Image (tube, rainbow, N blue to C red):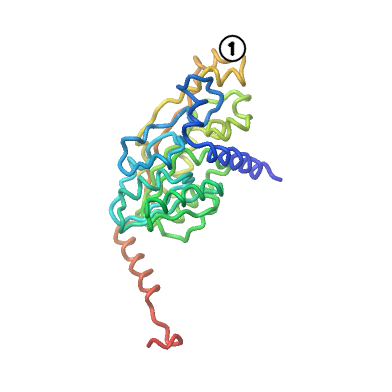
Amino acid sequence: MNKEQELKDIVKERYAKIAEQGKAENASSCCGATTPSNKVYNIMMDDYSETSGYIEDADLGLGCGLPTQFAQIKKGDVVIDLGSGAGNDCFVARHETGSEGKVIGIDFTPIMIQKARTNAEKLGYNNVEFREGDIDAMPVSDNVADVIVSNCVLNLVPNKGKVISEIHRVLKPGGHFSISDIVLVGELPDALREDAEMYAGCVAGAIQKESYLKLIKDNGFQNIKIQKEKTISIPDDILIKYLSQEEINAFNTGATGIFSITVYAEKQGTSQEKTTLEFSELQATNSCKPESGCC
């Protein structure tokens, strides 16, 4: 098995366990709780509870931002959420796009897909669907989405450039994305970077901020901007698992920084191109072929 597949399997295994536990149990061992923060999944989460469209049952507390808050979703938009988990960001996006739009969640963890579909069925959301698959090979056709969102997920994919290329493929001309993710300034200590649990917790999989933004630019996106940035602090009772006290002190006072950023970028094209594309697709769908006997 190659290294890339091994890392994917690590993430899938960890997040399957998280899905079975739910938010309350996950949070009981994370930053800010009374017990030691011996897991790293929730140390960077933002609070969704005041967000329109929020569904508590779909919130496992795994994000590092609020990308839907910045995504400029309009009524009728087609929105894709990468790494959709139990459906949290999809349901917030659905509130924005309305019943006339469509939301597609993609996740490669079967139990997450199952939980998300159950939540959607309970809510009666017929225009929200969940597809099992890798976000570096999306089960979606070209030029489908008006908007793509993702919350702390690209970290978990070894080949981030491939994901960004896929985002470009599935966005309509003039479409855009808003993605929250973890990036670095400076290098993590080897013990953190190499640990599997830290990888599944979105920290060890982070790449340099400049490299992250360059990948976006190199894949043809324009109008790239950081919509929000915040510093992520790893609690000492997590760091002590990996580093000596002396190393912790050096890490906390050094130049290395871990940040959550929400990045916006647009695929080249215009709204007119997008409208023409949509019209062409509609014509193709409704076309009548002589052999069908309808003409």
Residue drawn where x is 32% and y is 66% of the image: 276
**Residue 268 visible in this rendered orientation of the protein:** no
Q: Say which quarter of the image contains residue 247.
A: top right
Residue drawn where x is 48% and y is 42% of the image: 215
Is residue 81 toward the left or the right of residue 20 in the image? left
Q: Amino acid at mark 1?
A: Gln
Disc 1 is placed on an element classified as helix
Label 1 neighbourhood size at 10 Å, few (<14), some (14-19), many (20+)? few
Question: Residue 103: image x %, image y %?
Answer: 39, 53
Q: Say which quarter of the image contains residue 89.
A: top left
Is 188 or 13 nearer to us in this picture? 13
Residue drawn where x is 34% and y is 35% of the image: 49
Question: Residue 283: image x %, image y %?
Answer: 36, 73
Question: Mark 1 highlights which residue?
Answer: 245
**Residue 3 visible in this rendered orientation of the protein:** yes
Is 202 or 108 nearer to us in this picture? 108
Q: Say which quarter of the image contains residue 264.
A: top left
Residue drawn where x is 61% and y is 20% of the image: 241
| Count of numbered tags | 1
Where 8 sits versus 145, above or below?
above
| Residue lying at the far right of the rendered structure | 1
Q: Which quadrant would the N terminus be assigned to in this image?
A: top right
